[in-house]
Image: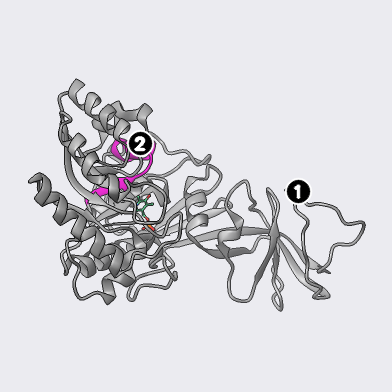
Amino acid sequence: MSSPEIVVDLEKIASNVRALKALYGARGINIFAVTKAVCGDPNLANILVNNGLNFLADSRLENIKNILDAGVHAKFLLLRTLPSEVDAVVKYTEISLNSNLTVIQLLSKAAVKVNVVHKIILMIEMGDLREGVMPIDLNDMVRKILRLPNIKLIGIGTNLACFGGIKPNARKMRTLSSLAVDLEKRFNIILSIVSGGNSANYNWFTKSEVLGRINNLRLGESIFLGRETLERKPIPDLHTDAFALSVEVIDSGVKPSIPFGESGLDAFGNKPVFEDLGQINRAILAIGKLDVQTDGLIPPENMTILGASSDHLILNTHEKTLEVGDRVTFSLNYGALLSVMGSQTIIKNYVNTNEYRPILQNGRGERPKAQNAFSNHRD
Ligand SMILES: *Cc1c(COP(=O)(O)O)cnc(C)c1O
């Protein structure tokens, strides 16, 4: 066992996928499974595909190539289009989300060059103020897009609760629906995808009797952490503990809770604040900010994270005394999940793999070149 280690329960993820597909599918909503939170992990991509979500969405072409190299049979939606990457975008992905005309023109040129038709979903600004065409500019933009060769506008979408924290409520979804209807009438086109958002759309979905034209969501966090993201509540019947980070204790003992000496700044230039709890049980764990976004780690109930430097995490273990060599298991929030799965220093251990044979990593956290990495048979 290496330290630290992320334990990924593939059967829990598979179960989340099936539950979400059933929940949303029952009311006509298709899901693009978003793999960016797990850094395009091919083992997880394989689970998504094998459980019925064969359209994967990622923001990074690197992740997409990684998944393709591993031999996963998926189609891809790109969430973020870089003008410098259009040639690769039309090569590796079927669809991309777009909101900038210059970028779409470049995609058109790239698609013409290799004689493919690239599909796009046009993102609409609905108040969260990240990507999206302002509704007032929409008709003009669509008119121009429809003239571009080798680009097919297959849908519209929006992204909320991301940058500006705006809720994807019934009102926003109604507006998106009616924009789809208007565009179809005005331009005599069919928009087969109306993508209403992400894991934050759960409350809207469960509370709304009418879903209008919304027939697609792009889900990451719900699948992997089993939560909706407006209030970060667990979704019924989903697993919230598919990922567990196991870390080794390298020192443990009783020390004061307040640093002593002349007070300055910490390793990161901040003035640290401490609460006086008297003498406490402290444990030092072999993980730090170099490995993971430590403030997104959730410790076991009877422990508190006091802080972290680049290589050490300090725990108040309260009544419990940990021994050197013990391991402590943490849950992860979204930020911690991103950083763990992208980390070169954290070993990935896939458990509950049933018939799936995971790609193993070598000791340095690199993936070997995958050859027949996925066979659905046991040896
Ligand atoms: C990351 C992302 C998603 C997925 O968000 P979750 O909260 O993980 O469901 C959906 N759409 C876009 C455009 C994204 O960038």
Kindly report which numbered mark, 1 or 2, lies closer to the viewer in this rendering.
1
Horizontally, residue 167 falls left or right of residue 182, namely right
Distance from Cα at disc 1 to Cα at disc 2: 35 Å
Q: Is mark 1 within 8 Å of ligand 1?
A: no
Q: Which mark is residue 47?
A: none
Q: Which residues are magenta?
A: 54-69
Q: Which residue is mark 2?
A: 61
The answer to whether 306 is drawn above or below residue 309 in the figure is: below
Foreground pick, 139 / 278: 139
Q: Assign a secondary structure to mark 1.
A: loop
* Residue 356 falls inside the magenta stretch: no
Foreground pick, 259 / 117: 117
Q: Which residue is mark 1?
A: 269
The image shows residue 200 at horizontal and vertical percentages of 37, 64
Horizontally, residue 267 falls left or right of residue 171, namely right
* Residue 67 falls inside the magenta stretch: yes
The image shows residue 64 at horizontal and vertical percentages of 33, 39
Foreground pick, 318 / 262: 262
The image shows residue 40 at horizontal and vertical percentages of 37, 45
The kind of residue on which mark 1 rests is Gly
Foreground pick, 229 / 7: 229
Image quarter for residue 277?
bottom right
The answer to whether 351 is drawn above or below residue 275 in the figure is: above
Q: Mark 1 or mark 2, which has the lower sequence index?
A: 2
